[in-house]
Image: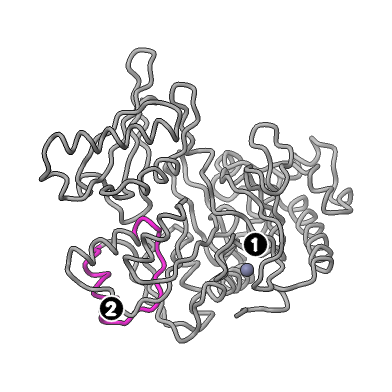
Amino acid sequence: MYWEPDKECMDREELEQLQLERLQSTLNRVCAHVPFYRRKFDELGIAPEDVQSLSDAARLPFTMKSDLRDNYPYGMFAVPLREVVRVHASSGTTGMATVVGYTRNDLKNWSNLVARIITMAGVTKDDVIQVSFGYGMFTGALGLHYGAERVGASVIPASSGNTARQIQFMRDFKSTALVATPSYALLLGDTLREMGIPVSALSLKWGLFGSEPWSEAMRKEIESKLGIVATDNYGLSEVMGPGISGECLERNGLHFNEDHFLVEVVDPETLAPVPDGEVGELVLTSLTKEAFPVIRYRTRDLVRMLSGECPCGRTGRRMSRVLGRTDDMLIIRGVNVYPLQIEHVLMEIEGTEPYYQIVVDRKGAMDEATVLVAAGESIFFDTMRKQKEMVDRIRAKLRQELGITVEVKLVERKSLQQFEGKAKRVVDNRKL
Ligand SMILES: [Zn+2]
C-alpha cells in the first residue's frame, strides 16, 4: 500500500532529474538568504550554478551540529520569522539546543512524508494510533501526530510517561498502533506482564518505533511481548524530524524519501564516500525545505546503504537500521565500543533483559567500564553461585564481542533508570 505511488515508485532517472532541480533551487536560496552558507561557498570558491549534476554535490560544504549551535537561535533560517509557523528544538544534552523552523509549506510536506512512512508500515485510516513519544520541542511526537492525521487515522496524543495510564488508554481506546521509542515499547510490554494483562486484551497490531538505535533481536522481543508487527523509522530534528526514511512491511531496510532528501554515506574520518554495503556516516541535504534548509548535514548516525530492489515496488533507496552514533561511540582503553554491541550480547543470554547502562570511570591512567545489566527478578532469589555464573557468562560474551574486559553487575530493572523517553545507555564519568 502506498500513500503517493507516483512519488514513491518514481523511475530513478526521473527522480534524479527532480533531485538535481530541487538541489539547485535550494543552493540558490541558501546562498541568497543564509550568511553562513554564502560564506562557506565563498571560502570553497563554489557558486550554486557550478552544481550541474548530483555528483557535484560532493564539492559542497558539510554542515555540522556545531554550525547550528553557533548560529543559535535563528541564524540558519532562510526565511523571515513571519513566514515561520512552527519552531522545534533538539535536545541540549550535549550542549545548547539547536533550533529549527517550518513554513506552512514545510509542515505540509512534513506531514505528507510521515504519511508515506506510516502507510508503508501498515497503518491506515482505520487505525487508532497512540503516540507515546514525549510531546514538546522534540519533533518525534508532533511529526508522527500530523502524519497520522493526514492518513486519517484516529490519533491519541498520549505523550510519554505514566506507563499504567498508557496501558489503560490502549485498552479503553482500543489502540491498534503504537508510536514510541523501542526501549519504551519494551517497558510497556514488560509492564503488561507484571500487571497480568494478556496481549489478547489489547487491540494492538502495529508498532512504529524510532529515535534510538535498536537491534533485530530487540524487535523480536517487542513483537512477542506486545503481539505486534514492529517497523523502524528514521528522522532527526536538524533535517526535518521523522519522515526521512522508514521500513516497508518487507522490513528489509528503510526507504528514503529521496525526492525530498539527497542521501550520501561518507567515511566519518576522511569524509570520502563509502560504497553501498559499507558502514559510514549518513549525510543528508534537504531538497524542498523553505525555513530551515540544510546542505550536507552530518547526522552522526552510522548506517549502510543497501543495494538491490525492494519487492514492495518503492524505488527509494534503503539504508540499514542505524548501527550506532559516532557520538555514542566510547573509546575504552583505545577500543571503539558502541552501546548496540552490548544489546546484541544481552539478547543472546537467557535470563537477562535488554535494559543496560555502561558506566565508564578512569582510575589513574586506566579506563574502567562497568555494564549494569537488568536481570529477571528470579535471579535474585538464586544462590550467589548462580548469580556469579551468570555474571561470568555475560562478561565472557562481552569480552568476545567488544575485545576488552568489562565489569558486569546485575541490577533490578527498576533501579536502572527511567525509560519514559530515550534510554540513557552511557554514563561517562571521565569527562568530569
Ligand atoms: Zn520496500
Q: Quadrant of ligand 1?
A: bottom right
Image quadrant for the C terminus? top left
Marks 2, 1: nearer the viewer: 2
Magenta segment boundaries in residue numbering: 162-184
Q: CA distance from mark 2 to mark 1?
A: 34 Å
The mark that comes first in sequence, 2 or 1, is 2
> Measured from the top left, where is residue 52 in percent x and y?
89, 53
Q: Amino acid at mark 1?
A: Phe
The crowd level at tag 1 (other Cα within 10 Å; few <14, some 14-19, many 20+) is many
> In the image, what residue occupies the spot 68% across and 57% down?
286
Mark 2 falls on what kind of element?
helix
Mark 1 falls on what kind of element?
strand
> Measured from the top left, where is residue 398 in percent x and y?
38, 34
> Measured from the top left, where is residue 353 in percent x and y?
29, 50
- Any atom of ligand 1 within 8 Å of the CB at mark 1? no
Q: Is residue 283 above or below residue 141?
A: above
Q: Which of the pair 93/312 is nearer the observer?
A: 312
Q: Is residue 100 above or below residue 192?
A: above
Q: Describe residue 48's horizontal placement relative to residue 176 as left or right.
A: right
> In the image, what residue occupies the spot 48% across and 51% down?
90
Q: Which mark is residue 256?
A: 1
